[in-house]
Image (cartoon, rainbow, N blue to C red):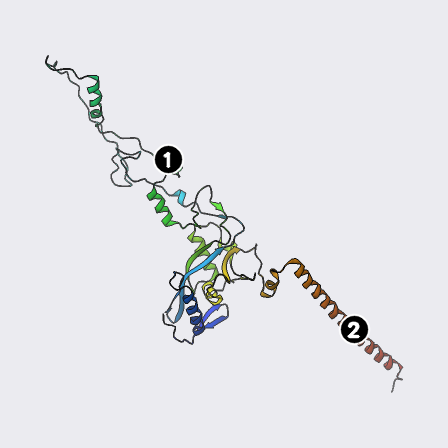
Amino acid sequence: MDYSHQTSLVPCGQDKYISKNELLLHLKTYNLYYEGQNLQLRHREEEDEFIVEGLLNISWGLRRPIRLQMQDDNERIRPPPSSSSWHSGCNLGAQGTTLKPLTVPKVQISEVDAPPEGDQMPSSTDSRDLKPLQEDTPQLMRTRSDVGVRRRGNVRTPSDQRRIRRHRFSINGHFYNHKTSVFTPAYGSVTNVRINSTMTTPQVLKLLLNKFKIENSAEEFALYVVHTSGEKQKLKATDYPLIARILQGPCEQVSKVFLMEKDQVEEVTYDVAQYIKFEMPVLKSFIQKLQEEEDREVKKLMRKYTVLRLMIRQRLEEIAETPATI
């Protein structure tokens, strides 16, 4: 990649810009961290616009269940022809064509001459051996309708299951099932989505939900940058998540991008995050110190305004004692 010096600006949010040179330095560090992995990012220019693209890791941080679309169960599954399957013996023809019953030929029965004396009549054993010959008559075996196949959704051949999985991604191995269509992904489990630096937060959310066929609205969720210190920063609708990830640095032991519910998570500033991991006795001592400092400041202000009040009263008394001059 060519990390040559650039001077133009790249937008990283509403009314926020970063120089292309500085962004390229962050991008170089990012790609060195993920050297040899598919998380490396690429950049290009289109019509004088600098674009970075690649995979973005997003961790699941949901507290409520999500709903998966029932799209797969509505698909009609037509098992392929097989000599050992329930439709063997049928003339399927081309896949998807309507089966036509075959016409059973008419068999005329005529009297036969008596066998010569030297010939023996076939025994019962021979009759059984000849029985399969009677089954060679063309006939239409019983087949199942599409409705029957749809009702038994769990009877799918391996090829059908592979075809369905190619059209639907799993959430940490969880594929759609009508019994588990409403579930909560494991907290902290990681997925990824391929995006570019021109995609805003709502666009990334819609792309992620569409990837896993999630029925919930994208407006229910938000993306948060969560630091190990406890700081939580919500990405705005005008932010670019991929740019934010690059600027935060590549190490996910320091910060991660989480998908969370909007109404379940509050932002935590850096100043507050410093105190989150302290034990309760330590936090109580901090509160006590702050209370003492507040009391001192209140007393100082009270003394200040008490002195000012006395000075004003003294001056008013002096003016009242002075005789009025004409």
| Towards the viewer: 91 or 248 | 248
> Residue 29, image x and y in percent?
43, 69
Residue depicted at x 49% and y 55%: 218
Side of 111 where 54 appears, left or right: right
Among all residues in the image, which is located at the extreme top? Answer: 117
Query: Which residue lies at the image location 40% right of the left edge and 45% below the top edge?
Result: 72
Q: Quadrant of residue 77?
A: top left
Note whether 127 is above or below 146 in the view shown: above
137 is higher (above) or lower (below) than 149: above
Residue type at the position of mark 1: Gly
Q: In the image, which disc is placed on residue 303?
A: 2
Q: Quadrant of the N terminus?
A: bottom left
Residue 222 pos. (x, y %): 51, 57
Camera-side residue of 35 and 213 = 35
Query: Which numbered mark, 1 or 2, is in the foreground of this view?
Result: 2
Q: Which residue is mark 1?
A: 148
Left or right of 295, for residue 36? left
Q: Position of residue 309 (x, y in %)?
A: 81, 75
Query: Gap in Å between the C-alphas at discs 1 and 2?
Result: 89 Å
Q: Give residue 302's quadrant in the image.
A: bottom right
Q: Position of residue 83 (x, y in %)?
A: 26, 35
Q: Residues within 10 Å of mark 1 (few under 14, many from 20)?
A: few
Q: The disc labelled 2 sits on which kind of residue?
A: Arg
Q: Quadrant of residue 266?
A: bottom right
What is the secondary structure assignment of the residue under circle 1? Answer: helix
**Label 2 residue SS:** helix
